[in-house]
Amino acid sequence: MTEPLCRLYLITPPALPDLAGFLRDLEAALGAGDVAALQIRLKGAADDAVAEATRAILPLAHAHGVAVIMNDRPDLARALGCDGVHIGQGDASFADARKAVGPNGMVGVTCHDSRHLAMEAAEAGADYVAFGAFFPTTTKEAPTRADPEILSIWQETMEVPCVAIGGVTVENCRPLVRAGADFLAVSAGVWARPDGPAAAVRAFLAEIEAGLKERNPFNQN
């Protein structure tokens, strides 16, 4: 049996007024330990600004083996060569997203606190479903509050990976890992941490390791 895993899924800050500074932070974060993906989420930014940021981020992320996911915009994901797209309930349809990124691209779907929405997304062919928000967040307005139990139920009944999102920090993430999150989606919890993004990633990875041992106490290696 494959041992359970949980990995970091980073999300950009909502704005990048200093792109060069962010790239330095990103290099530090990705060099600090295992990160699975980076979502480019620049709400309200002009397409040209999103494109400029994405073209700068892609080679850096790919050099670390990190997938780059575009938020909301399947058209930009395809045009800019991203590895996938993340869509919300009010964004592009799943069919349009899949058509844009193709059969080998990733499509993730926001499902709030709804197993019904998540099951619909999984049945449509989503590569992952995202539940949340689990905690208060300043990054975006969260219409729902999810309970960690939804991660446990999903993990026990479905094979499509689940992402825990919304206000996730080093201090509060371990119960989400223990409950069954396959990925922790983090934005301010890394970029706004006072000791810097590299230290934040290392601290998250330590909490993930501890949470996985609590999820599976028979594996203490």
Image: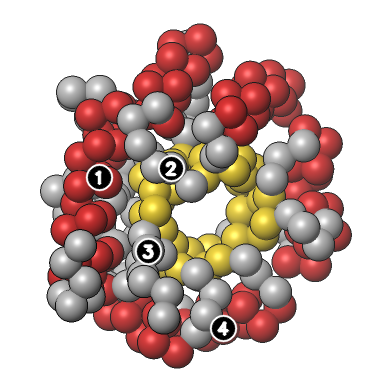
Estimate the spatial distance between the alpha carbons at disc 1 and disc 2, rounded to whole Å.
10 Å
Camera-side mark, 3 or 4: 3
Q: Residue at the location (50% across, 69% down)?
A: 161
| Mark positioned earlier in the residue sequence (2 or 3) | 3
In which quarter of the view is residue 142 placed?
A: bottom left
Q: Which mark is residue 190?
A: none
Camera-side mark, 1 or 4: 1
| Mark positioned earlier in the residue sequence (3 or 4) | 3
Q: State whether residue 144 is above or below residue 183.
A: below
Report which residue position mark 2 lands on.
35
State the image coordinates of residue 8 (x, y, percent, origin top left): 39, 48
Q: State whether residue 199 is above or below residue 152.
A: above
Report which residue position mark 1 lands on.
204
Q: State whether residue 65 is above or below residue 32.
A: below
State the image coordinates of residue 126 (x, y, percent, origin top left): 65, 69
Q: State whether residue 143 is above or below residue 59.
A: below
Q: Type of residue at label 4?
A: Met
| Mark positioned earlier in the residue sequence (4 or 2) | 2
Q: Which mark is residue 119?
A: 4
Pick the front one: 34 or 86: 34
Q: Type of residue at label 1?
A: Phe
